[in-house]
Structures are given as structure tokens and as C-alpha cells.
Amino acid sequence: MVLHQVWTALSGVSGIALACCLLAAAAVLRWAGRRTARRAAARARQRQRAGLETMDKAVQRFRLQNPDLDSEALLALPLPQLVQKLDSGELSPEAVLFTYLGKAWEVNKGTNCVTSYLTDCETHLAQAPRQGLLYGIPVSLKECFSYKGQDSTLGLSLNEGVPSECDSVVVQVLKLQGAVPFVHTNVPQSMLSFDCSNPLFGQTLNPWKPSKSPGGSSGGEGALIGSGGSPLGLGTDIGGSIRFPSAFCGICGLKPTGGRLSKSGVKGCVYGQTAVQLSVGPMARDVESLALCLRALLCEDLFRLDPTIPPLPFREELVPFLPNNIPYALEVLTTGGLFSDGGHTFLQNFKGDFVDPCLGELILILKLPRWFKSLLSFLLKPLYPRLAAFLRSMQPRSARKLWELQHEIEVYRNSVIDQWKAMNLDVLLTPMLGPALDLNAPGRATGAISYTVLYNCLDFPAGVVPVTTVTAEDDAQMEHYRGYFGDIWDIILKKAMKKSVGLPVAVQCVALPWQEEMCLRFMREVERLMTPEKRSS
């Protein structure tokens, strides 16, 4: 009876008027949301500009007071040597900080990698404990690391103007070890992309070639360290977010086991899922710097500030290794864990906001009705099984199905470990994706994360080391590339990797859970073997 009355009302003139009013209200709400997003972007960019101006003024003031400082020689020092010179007093912490501030300001003009200048770094420098392993070392932070008084926006307008109330645990430990956090760096919107662009701060560019992506989601870190603007940085990784930018920008990066370093105070936009672990890890120009950072972080202060972290200090012993190479891919289990609710929680972050192009296709897929995803998956399966599996993984799951998925991941992890032991392996040497992709291409080539996301699913430590650069012959051979599946992702990859001569190429080193030291030892051996002369061949 009630439904009949509603239908009668809607079918009359008054119903048409009501429908028009509803449509108009929806349009007004959408316009208001977009206006709010535009204002948030304007405020964020104004804050970015003001911070960079303050940063430049501080650098110029220091340079006037210290005209004889050899900045180029200082910037050329590897991190371990920098630590030694600071410890001995041969270099002052002020000279190191302001030299890197100047370099970061300079390289930001060409890469747009810095979102915030952490203005209290000068104050903290005077308070840095001399006994710390990282005394006087400037450290850059991916924007998701909470820093007191600073926004961690993730490129989303809803987070703009919401400064953090305290430092994240790893930032606190860095400070206790004498390090000086000095900038926040850019991320892709929501951080679920291996590109680096968002509506608040714009596109970050690759320091090797501006038409290429720096990778993501720790893309600002990759660009800044890769261009010499920071000696050490912290990133996060849930599908390759440390390893992609490290590989694309020609630096080293380590994704530890998920629970090795604290995630307390690290901001994200997908909470609650535990199937695929987020990892916090270091990024630097060489492997020894990664080891130094991990050695400093794995201390009593970390275990005290976050009692959920196993009290495993850095193990110094060197162990032998036996490299091997096995290919695996595990997209469905991982993606299913990240979007176990069909992407509902993830989509809530974008209400009234602009969607960055690097996320456009993902958002479109997540918004499709469940029945339509099922239909598309069924139709695509005979021709494009990889795309069909990806669409199926985007379906919402019941609690029971989620438990089943997590059990599948556990079973898969155990089977890989059993095979690993049966083959008597210590570490694996595996491929990375290749050279940096064109800007905006990562958002359309989701399948490429299979090179990295497997080890997030397995929760194995994995690091990348640059070993060579693309030659003209390599670039020409891409014309004959067809890919394993021959689907749209392979087509996009072929196009996005063109014109890559001179760009860095990395390999990936993998170890068993909680064996970060073994992974670093192997990475250092790969780095040692790949001398500059060999990298060009």
C-alpha cells in the first residue's frame, strides 16, 4: 500500500518536481565537495611554497655565514663516512643539515618531491644526542609518517589541515639516535599506486628523466634520494612501495618483515586487513646505509616505545649464501586481502574529492556493481585470465570468505617455505619490473606489481639493488616484446618502457621472514660484484 502511494506520487507532476529537486541537491552537494577539495589543494600548495621559501632562506643565511664550506665534497660522502666525520667532529651537524637542505631545495625544483619542510629540524639539531648511531644525519620521511604539527595528507583533501599530535614511533627512535628529520616527501593519492601524483601537491618526476615516473608509493623519497637531496629516508611498502621507487630512481631500498619495525603512527587509508602486512623500511644510495639505518632503529628505544615489536636487535654476524632464482606470481590472494570489503573502506576516502589520474581506473573498477564485475570476469576469463582474476579479487567477501582467504595465504606461505628449505636456499635473486615507466602508466599496469607483491603476501624481507642501465640495444629489443599473457597490461608495459636508454635497472634480493640481515648481506654482495664498469654492460 505504501509503495503504491509512493509510486503514484512519483508518477505525477509533483513526483517529477521531487526528482528534479533530488537531482539538483545531488549536483549542489557534488559542487560543494569539489569546491572544498579545490580549497584544500590551494591551502596545501600554499603551505608547501611557504615551507620551501623558509627552507631556502635558512640555507642562504647559513651559506653567508660559512662561505668556505665545500658542499659538493660533503654531498659526495657515503652515509657511513658522513657518520664517522660527524662523530669525530671533522664535520659539524649544522654543515651537514644545511648542505642537504640546500640540495633538497634545488632538486625539488625539477622533481616536486618535497611536500613539507620540517621547520623544527634546526631546534632538534641542537638537542640531538651525540651518542646516537645517526648523530647529525638528515633523514627524509615519506609523508605518511606522523610528525608533530605537520599534516600527513596522503594526497587526500579530507586530511589537509589536520596536523599530527605526536611523532610516529620510528620518528621518535630516529631522533633518539641523533638523526634529524628535515622534510616530508610526496606520495600518490591514497598511497595505493606505484606512481606518485595527487591533487594536493601534484606529480613527482623521475630525477633521471622527467617524462618517467619515480615509482610509488614512496616516490617522493625515491626522487629526493636518487637526485642526492637526502642521504637516508624512510618509506613504507605494501605491494612494492619501497622497491618500485628505489628501482626506478637508481637507489637501494629494503622492505623488512611486516613486524620488524613499528607501524605505530604511520597513516594509511585501508585499516583492519591483516592478510597483507605493511612494512616500514629504509631507502638510501647504498646497501651499507640501509644496514646502518636498520641497526640504529632496532634498539631498546623501539622495543620500549612499541612493545608489540619483537625485541630482535640487529644481528651483526655475516653468513654464507646460496643464490637461486624462482618465478612466482600471486595477485589474487594479495588483492583480495587488500579489498576484502570490495573497496568500500578505501572509497570512503574519496568522497567529494578529486581522483588523481594514477588511480582513475582502480576507482572505476571498485565502483562497478558486484554483478557487473562478475559478468566481466566471466566474459574475460577465456581470453584474458589475468584480468578476469583481478576483477574477481575485487569482490566483497563475507567474514567466512575472508577467513578462508587468510587461511589460503597461510597455506601458500608455508608451502613456499617448505620448498625453500627442500632446495636448501638461503636467499633468492629475482627480477624487478625493469626501468621506470612513463608518467601515469603505473595506474594502468596493475599486473606489474606481481614482481613485488608476492613477497608482501609471503611477508618475506626483500630489497632492491641497482645493477645496470638500459642500453640502446635493450631499448630496440623492446619492439619485439609481447609479454607472457599478451593482455592489455603487457601492451601498456611495452609502450611505457620505451625511450629508457640510460635509466637504472635493479634486481630484487629476498630472504625468509625475520632474516633482514641475511637479505642485506646478499644485497651488499650483489652491489659489490656489480662495479660501475659492470653496470654498463
Image (spheres, helix red, strand yellow):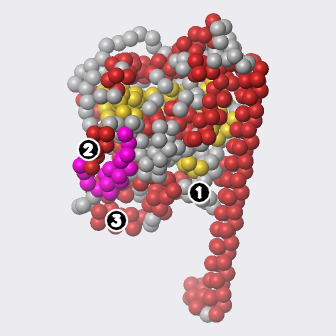
Q: Earlier in the sequence, mark 2 or mark 3?
A: 3
- Seen as rendered, the residue at the extreme top is 88
Amino acid type of the residue that numbered disc 1 sits on in the rendered structure: Phe
- Seen as rendered, the residue at the extreme bottom is 12
Q: Quadrant of residue 352?
A: bottom right
Most foreground residue, 337 or 495? 495
Most foreground residue, 354 or 494? 494
Which dot marks residue 376? Answer: 3
User: Badge 1, how many Cα within 10 Å: few under 14, some, many 20+?
Assistant: some
Query: Vertically, is 272 above or below 293?
Result: below
Which dot marks residue 350? Answer: 1
Q: Magenta includes 495?
A: yes
Q: SS for tag 2?
A: helix
Label total for image: 3
| Left or right: 112 in relation to 53 | left
Which dot marks residue 209? Answer: none
Q: Which residue is mark 2?
A: 477
* Magenta-colored span: 480-501
- Residue 148 in view of the camera: no
